[in-house]
Amino acid sequence: MDINNDTILLSESDNYESGFRDVFFKYLRYWKWFFLSLIISLSLSYLYIRLSTPQYKLETDLLIKDNKGNLGGSSDLLKDLDLFSSDKIIDNEIQILKSNTLLEKVTRGLNLQTSYFSTGGVRLHEVYTDLPLKVELVAASPDFDYKKNYFIHLINKDQVVINGVKYPTNTPISVDLGKILVTTTNKPANSSNISFNDEFQIKFDDVQDIVERYSKKINITPVSKQATVLIITLEDAVPQKGKDILNRLVLEYNKAAVDDKNQVTATTVAFITDRLNKLQEELGDAEKKVENYKSGNQITDISSQSQIFLQSVKDNDSELSKVNIQLGVIKSIERYISSNTDGKTQLPSMLGIEDPTLLALVNQLGDAELKKQSYLQTIPENNPIVTSINDQINALKAAVSQSVQNLKNNLLETKKLLTNTNSSFQSVISQVPAKERGLIDVMRQQEIKNNLFTYLLQKREESEISLVSTAADSRIIDEARSTKRPVKPVIPLTVFVFVLFGILIPVIVIYLLDMLNFKVLKRQDIEGVTKAPILAEISHSTDLSALLVAAKPRSMVAEQLRALRTNLNFVIPGDSQKILLFTSSISGEGKSFISLNLGASLAMSGKKVLVLELDLRKPKLSAGLEIDNSRGLSNYLIGEVDYKDIIKPVPQQENYFIITSGPIPPNPAELLLNGKIKELLELLKADFDYILLDAPPVGLVTDAQILSEFADVTLFIVRHNYTAKSHIYSIDNFYRTRKFKNLNIVMNSIDMHGGYGYGYGYGYGYGYSYGYGGYYQEDESAAKGGIAKLFRKKK
């Protein structure tokens, strides 16, 4: 059992090694292709690296502040409701940072619409800093050609040449379909290897094109799911330009966030200012009335009791005024909630409102409205994100409406109590002397206006301080920084990719050629289709001798034919079986060459051999041997001559005879069926040891199948890189159906330099190299034609 297992493992190992050798030598023979492809790929990688614009990676880190707990004095209930948690959602902030609005502000702020390129060197490279001039597109017509490039250089500080035309500097000038302004700077850029008179290529870009390009290039990712730190990266050819873009982007983001926060505060300041202007007039009128009453009634002061009473009345009136202000704010909020403005109006001021729940809800509503407006700048109304925010706004409005109603009810109750208190004060006032009562009335109105005026002044100062001191909810951790070396192209990776393609392209081409080649190239192409035995393999020969075994008996082909002669002993078991039939699928596969030279090899062994040229349509043997073919087999088949009259000796070889085909008859197949060929073969078997039948191709005519009944052995010739693979299926059919007796295959014209066996061979006499160890007559020429060619110098 162990022996069997070892045998199986050994067989699998041999098959694996054989398959690997097949693949290796299959591609090794095309080594010149690989060498040329690698040279080209390395050259292309050098050009790619040389001509590619290096890209540097820029990075900045931004912290989004977490505002949770900013109302630390709120109750646990409000904390549980999460009313005061941070509204900064990281994904939303990422979208805002990449929004077209911010990028457009960055583009215009840095004047990125104009790009400058130095024309010196192998490729154009962008120049960003230390330029001796600045070009600005003042006005572009709708048909302005942004693809056109302008070549510009300064003559002096007053003149500039643009596309060969002189123009003045520091004044708008008209060019194709637009106006530009060229201004000089005080930086001749000697530190950047740029002289004053260097020529630059100027390119103008549309703002929207720049925004779209950088929106794709800027990458924003959070450090982790729990963190609120964003890493903003950008790849650009000019490090300083990339730094400026990232720093300006963060600046515009913070500025936009501050502006959003200040909107509500600015509304409050405007509301208070308007109220102060009106109160100032009312306060002046009240003070004038007090002055006129005192002067008209000659009153300088009132009693202390009246003074104390007046103070109580003022305090009550002050509280009533505050309640009225809050009710006015409540009405503004109700109008805002009930209006259908889609957030286009600003939130009302919350002046005087001290309810923490309502304050938190209104703040959240305002932030949601601002967030919606920010999103609508980049995405449509029907986007799921906007829909989600709309749902949130509606829910907040409902909560605000409920809270407002509760607060309104409380304020109305308070107002009712304060009003009743005032009524009781009125009854007391009626008991005060008439002049003092009148004075109390006018002073009461003055104090109400004065207290309210003071209160609003205080609130305006607080709002203005808040407006000035508003800070963004983000902080730059690290300003934009650049890598020291370009991140693109990566030279080792680029070279590796080009080398990989340099290897893969020949592999793919060779594989496709092999897939598209429908001819027999190796022994496996036959063995994979049919079980018919391969009796011999004959190499290709460039020698033109018809009898190669006689002309070059030490040649490799001659030795392989001797091996075929030896192998015949294994397929011809009896001495009486001496008729060999030679055929092939199509013409040109070498059956006449094999039959003629195998017959000569048999004759050399002392046997008496006769070859019949049975291809009556296209005879080749007689032409190759230069034998007269005026009388031959066709004359015998029609009864004109006796068979002994057409037997002719083969020149150059003793014991070797031939019966040529004779004149070409009009009906070859019918002649073979008239019975004369059977009689001829019976007669010839008595005189010859071997009879070789050189028949026509079986794939073209039926002659070979007619002759198959007389043959003892059939040798089917398959030519390397000539016979179609589909013909092997026909051979397999003949083998399985036994239409030909004792069918065997002979591989012919194997080109050892053309890939048969991919360089290591199968048959006797040729092995693992092309030198053959000086064993054959062709060894010297083969060596010269093989590896020696690599070292041969041109003459």
Image: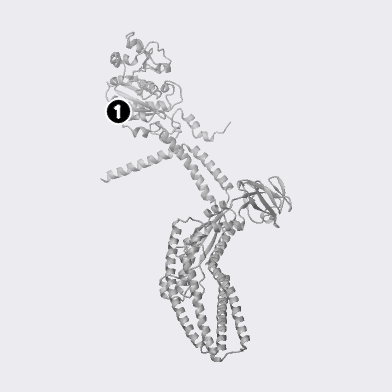
In x, y percent, where is residue 197?
71, 50
Residue located 61% across and 89% down the image? 300
Asked if 370 appears above or below 695 in the picture, the reply is below
Q: How is the image coloured?
A: one colour
Does the image show residue 176? yes
- When asked about the image quadrant of residue 640, the answer is top left
For the N terminus, the quadrant is top left
- Whether residue 55 sits left or right of residue 21 in the image: it is right
Q: Nearer the viewer, residue 77 or 61?
A: 77
Residue hosting label 1: 735
**Looking at the image, which is closer to me, 525 or 486?**
486
Q: Quadrant of the C terminus?
A: top right
- Identify the residue shown where x is 40% and y is 41%: 20
Q: Is residue 56 visible?
A: no
- Residue 739 falls in image quadrant: top left
* Residue 265 % position (x, y): 54, 69
Residue 227 horizontal/vertical position (percent): 47, 65
Left or right? Give the position of 282 relative to 640.
Answer: right
Query: Which element carries disc 1, helix, strand or loop?
Result: helix
Residue 105's place in the image compared with 5, above or below, is below
Whole-percent x, y for residue 249 in the image? 56, 60
The type of residue carrying mark 1 is Tyr
